[in-house]
């Protein structure tokens, strides 16, 4: 069955795994609980168990779109100043070299220069949300990098090139945060972050597919865009998910508030 594509929030650092006594069991600050609950049902919301997951994380950038083709990646603990137990977490999902090769071919057919690598571990934009979503770690993963130019139209086009994977049992997931200005919170963030979230959701859910893509590619013109994303790496995974969504309607799949910021997830298909 055709799988959907998603743009999901991955939280802050290892935020869902706060309990040093039971580090492998999600246990988080109450403000993260709605997001954790959303992630916990993500796989069950799919039409069937996926063959693999292709995930684009905000935490990997390369000069070219780069596909991870390894078969047994380790974890990359790319967060800092968290409790010691969070650097001993396990999530042993296998890679999917055959799906990685297919993704590489599709991107090349779409006109992109593509690199491959096999040594990098799953960064926390992968293993933290997926450890909540699929603690069994039994669904193979392919990771795709962002491109360092952060060109929104290119990332949308890359998603479009990858869209056939959805018909081949692969769910496509962009992992980021719809609001990512870590320097503001509560009252100083609330009004502007709400304006941004409403504008972003209106663009993502636009019923005209081409206009939707144009509006998201021009995200900097949305209200409070640079307040929400001083740097856009946490928004770019949305571009890939939206491109992979094709003609499927975009809809809001989750909404919660963290430190005064509204955080949204979106689903296509």
Image: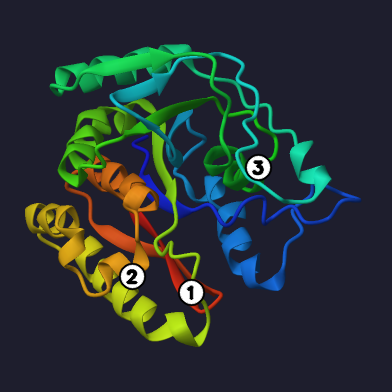
- Where on the picture, by quarter, is residue 202? bottom left
Q: Which residue is mark 3?
A: 131
Which mark is drawn over residue 227? Answer: 2
C-alpha span from label 3 to label 2: 30 Å
Q: Which residue is mark 1?
A: 184
- Looking at the image, residue 169 sits to the left or right of residue 207; the answer is right
Mark 2 surroundings: few (<14), some (14-19) or many (≥20) residues within 10 A: some
Mark sitting earlier along the chain (1/3): 3
Which mark is drawn over residue 18? Answer: none
Q: Indicate the position of residue 16 as horizontal and vertical percent values.
A: 69, 55
Q: Work out whether 183 lies above or below 91.
A: below
Name the quadrant of the N terminus: top left
For numbered disc 2, what is the local secondary structure? helix
For numbered disc 1, what is the local secondary structure? loop
- Where on the picture, by quarter, is residue 253? bottom left
Q: Is residue 269 visible to us here? A: no
C-alpha span from label 1 to label 2: 9 Å
Q: Work out whether 90 lies above or below 227.
A: above
For numbered disc 3, what is the local secondary structure? helix
The residue sitting at 34% across, 25% down in the picture is 168
Pointer 1 with pointer 2, Cβ within 8 A:
yes
Q: Is residue 208 visible to us here? A: yes
- Decide which of 9, 150 is in the foreground and name it: 150
The residue sitting at 19% across, 69% down in the picture is 222
């Amino acid at each position: 069955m055709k799988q959907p594509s998603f743009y999901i929030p991955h939280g802050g650092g290892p935020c869902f795994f706060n309990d040093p006594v039971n580090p492998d069991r999600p246990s988080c600050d109450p403000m993260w609980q709605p997001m954790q609950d959303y992630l916990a049902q993500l796989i069950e919301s799919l039409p069937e168990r996926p063959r693999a997951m292709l995930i684009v994380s905000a935490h990997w950038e390369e000069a070219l779109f780069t596909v991870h083709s390894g078969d047994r990646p380790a974890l990359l603990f790319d967060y800092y100043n968290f409790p010691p137990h969070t650097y001993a977490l396990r999530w042993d999902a296998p890679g999917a070299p055959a799906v990685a090769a297919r993704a590489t071919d599709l991107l090349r057919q779409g006109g992109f220069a593509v690199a491959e690598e096999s040594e990098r571990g799953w960064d926390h934009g992968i293993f933290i949300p997926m450890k909540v979503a699929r603690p069994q770690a039994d669904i193979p993963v392919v990771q795709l990098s962002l491109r360092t130019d952060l060109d929104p139209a290119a990332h949308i086009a890359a998603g479009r090139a990858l869209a056939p994977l959805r018909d081949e049992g692969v769910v496509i997931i962009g992992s980021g945060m719809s609001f990512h200005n870590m320097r503001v919170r509560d009252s100083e963030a609330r009004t502007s972050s709400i304006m941004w979230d409403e504008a972003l959701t209106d663009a993502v859910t636009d019923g005209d597919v081409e206009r939707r893509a144009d509006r998201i590619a021009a995200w900097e013109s949305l209200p409070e865009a640079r307040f929400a994303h001083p740097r856009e790496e946490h928004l770019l995974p949305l571009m890939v998910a939206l491109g992979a969504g094709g003609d499927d309607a975009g809809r809001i799949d989750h909404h919660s508030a963290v430190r005064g910021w509204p955080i949204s997830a979106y689903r296509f298909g």
